[in-house]
Each structure stands twice: as C-alpha cells, then as structure tokens.
Image (spheres, coloured by chain):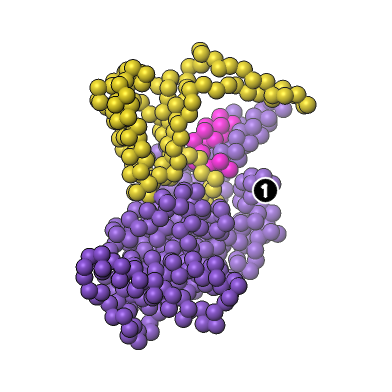
Chain colours: A yellow, B purple
Amino acid sequence: MKYLLLKHYRGAPAPVNDVSMDKWTPDEVDAHMKYMSEFAARLEDTGEFVDGQALAPEGAWVRYDGPGRAPVTDGPFAETKDLIAGWMIIDVDSWDRAVELAGELSAAPGAGGEPIHEWLEVRPFLTMVPTVTE
Amino acid sequence: MNDSLLRELVPAVIGVLVRRGADFASAEDAVQEALIRALSTWPGDPPRDPLGWLVTTAWHRFLDAARADASRRGRELAVEVEPPAGPACATDDTLRLYFLCAHPTLPQASAVALTLRAVGGLTTRQIATAYLVPEATMAQRISRAKRRIAGLPLDQPGDPGTVLRVLYLVFNEGYSGDVDLAAEAIRLTRQLATLTDEPEVAGLLALMLLHHARRASRTGPGGRLVPLGAQDRSRWDTGLIAEGVTVLQAALARDRLGEYQAQAAIAALHADARTAAETDWVQIVEWYDELLRLTGSPVVRLNRAVAVGEADGPRAGLAALADLDPDLPRYAAVTAYLHERAGDLEQAAELYAAAARTAASVPERDHLTREAARVRHLLCP
C-alpha cells in the first residue's frame, strides 16, 4: 500500500518547535538535511521507499485559455492558504506503519537541534486496480 | 525458448543448488544472476540444454560468490566444489520453495516479491515495475525477506493457506507494467496444483480461471469498470470457464470444502448464466451462507446482502446488512445499489456519491461517480 507523506510550508497546524528554517544556524540546517536523507536511505534499505521530492516555495497558477491561445499564468499568490514543501512516497504493509514512519519523519531536528514535531499529512494512494469483488 | 518457459525452470535450478549444499539465499541470488544472463544471451545463442545451462551458470556464480565470501572471512569454502550427483526430486523442491517464500513470518509484500522471484522466475526489475516501486527498493525488500527466513529448514511442510493468500494477492494485482500478474498467478497456482492434491489449491485455481475468463468484459473503453450485470457475456472466455468448472467439480468431489472452493462455486454460477437475469441467485445465497460459515467475514456478509437483494428483493438485502459496520469498504456502494433497486433514488444518489469518496481504486471511484450522476439525472432529468 502506497502513502504520500506531505510536508507543508504553510497550511498545516503549527509545529511544537515553530521556528522557520531561515532563522536556524547553518549547522542546524545541515543536521536537518542529514536526518532527511538518512531517513530516505533507511527506507530504501527496508524496501519501503518509493520517491521523495522537495519543491520550491514559489511557482505559478496556470490554466487553459481557449483554442489557439497561450495558457494564462498568474500568481504566485501570497494569500494562498496551503503551500506544499515536498513529499515522500512510501510503500508499506499497513496504515499503522505509514503513521509510524510519518512520526519519525516529523521528529527531524530543527532550531536548537530539537525535533520540529512538524505536522505531516498522510494520504493513501488510490490504486489503479480494483480488487476482484463481483 | 520463450521467457515463460525459461522462468518455469527457475525453482528447479534453485532446488539443484540447494541439494548441492548451497544455502537458499545464495542459491536464489546465483540463479537470479544466471536468469538475467540467460535473458540477454539466449535470444541470439540459445543453449541446447536450457536446464543444464542454467544449473552450470548458476552453480559457477554461486561458487564465485562463496569463494569471495570465504576469502573475505578467511575461511575455507564449506561446500564441495565438485557437485555430487543430486537425487532428483524436483517436484518436492518446488513445493517447498512455495512454502518458504510465503512463510508466515514474512510481511505480505515481501512474501509476494520473493515468490515472484524464486518460484516465478521474474527479475527484480520486472517485479519492481509491476509494483511501481524503484528497483533498489524491491531488491532490498527481497534480500531482507531472505535474511528473515535464513536458517529455516527447507524440508518442512508449510502452510498451504499462506501460499494461497500470496497467490491470490498476486492475481488481484492484475496487469501493470510489462508483467501480467494475473496470468502469472494462474501459472503459479496451476503448477502448485500439480504438486499437491489439496482441494483448496484447486479451488483457488478454479476461482482464478473463472474470474480471468471475464477479464475482457470487465473493463470498457478508457478502462471504465463494467459491473457483472452489464457485461457482454459473449466476450467471456468459454474455454477458461469450462476448465475452471472442471477443476472446481473435481475439488468439490473431495468433500473438503474451503473458502476458495466456495468462492469459485459462486463465480461458476455467474459464469453459468447466459444472461444476468438467468442468474441462480438462490443458489448463490446458499454458497454465501457456506462461505460465511467458513470465514465469518464481514466482507462476505456484505456481498451476501447483494445476493439476498437479488434473490428476495432489495428490502431483504438491506435487512441482511443489519449489524454490519458502515465503515466497511464498499458498504456505501452496496447500500446505494440496494436503495436504488428499492426505488429510494434520493438516498441512492447520496450513497453512491459517498461511496465514490471512500473508494480505494480509481476505476471504482469513477464508476461510482458515474452511478451517482446517473441516479441524480433520473431524479431531475
């Protein structure tokens, strides 16, 4: 079963260790990055890692504007409530295991080297194959 | 020689290496390497004796790895370099591999991966592609599984139930990537049925054949899901149905009923109806009663309610849902259907929409969304 662990720049409830990253020391940033890459490596080792990606905070809104016309772009909108920082996709045996791993990821160190206790969103994948039920 | 014939040789080759003194994990690795080499060299230069080629190549790989390992540890190589003439009992070897790969101590995803590699003869890359995970992740999943069962004796009888569950999971995965997992599951179950006379193995084989027979009619254009009642029955594979029914009848004659045989019996009754209206729902309900007695599963009670709805009317079907947990997967979809049949369109539309929100797969969600739209349209054309 695959799950998406979503990390938010904005839009998630406030973490316990609520200091934004630009106010950390360089060593604290390094320690955080190291934790994240070790976490991914450990999941690869347990056969549970699928994908992980960080996203730039700024992008744009794009939409179709009719035949023969270039797409319209707009933004970025500062007022957007929700902003995704990145994701990790895991393939695990159960929801409980997904929650356990999200808990570990949320313990990544932040300011003062203390765990951030960041809220991560865990979302199950919809599969492409319906289980035979007829 | 095509790939599937090559794959069929894999468990026998592992068996030969183990009988020559290799441990299962190293033997399996060596055979996988030989397999990958065969896949790249055989098309241009096929060997005269494929089995002999695989055994020789895998054995040399094993010896190379064992020597490297021994010199790393500063130890003597424990196995005989000259292979003893092994006693030939390839069928028992293969059966034991099924049990070992589906060992109850393994997580299900690991048992599936290991079975597909060691018994199915698929490469790690093919398995990774089929399950949409990176090859490195799948390789780790398999080597961890092998570490977990290291030291377990290969000559112990195992639990057929866990093997059948693994094969059933593979079957349900259907078709993704370049590997037809449903067909692979059938091949492995068919092979297992030649190795053991356990009626439930035949029951599972029959169930798979009967479901597989309907595969072409189960999806419409764009992958849309076509429910049983709306399927074009002329597209059902009558050859597979006939085989499934024969296998099932032989199993039932043994008089040791199990859940797979009961499920296959239900599938056979569907296959037997020339039109949806001719379906023998009364007999299907009786088989669901058997299945419920065997499993006590709430999912079976849910499906039984659908059959009761057809046999005795939608109100009876709704009554059969009493005491079931509404959080059960597909509970909303079943109640939606029964309410629609009972003429409560308002409620049916809402339940279809709710069912779509909790669907676990994309085709199911889309189907339920269309059902909600259809019923809403009946209400306000």
Name which residue type carries label 1.
Answer: Gly
On the image, the x and y values in percent for residue B149 come to: 29, 62
Range of the magenta residues?
Answer: B347-364
Q: Main secondary structure of the magenta part?
A: helix
Residue B214 as seen in the image, left or right of residue B98: right
Which residue is outermost to the right?
A68
**Residue B233 on the magenta span:** no
The picture places residue B190, in percent across and down from the top left corner, at 49, 70
Residue A75 seen in render:
yes
Residue toward you, B70 or B129: B70
Q: Name the spot of residue A68 as percent of width and height, x first.
A: 78, 26
**Quadrant, the N terminus of chain B:** bottom right
A25 lies left or right of B36: left
| Along the line of sight, the residue nearer the viewer: A91 or A20 | A20
Q: Chain of mark 1?
A: B
Q: Is residue B295 visible?
A: no
Q: Is residue B84 above or below residue B130?
A: below
Q: Residue at x 60, y 66 (%)?
A: B241
- Point out the image quarter for the C terminus of chain B: top right
Q: Is residue B39 above or below residue B343?
A: below
Which percent across, then down, holds residue B218?
62, 52
Q: For the residue labelled by badge 1, is the local secondary structure a helix, a strand or a loop?
A: loop
Q: Name which quarter of the figure residue B75 lies in.
A: bottom left
Between residues B216 and B120, which one lies in front from this camera angle? B120
Vertical relation: A103 (above or below) B156 = above
Residue, disc 1: B220
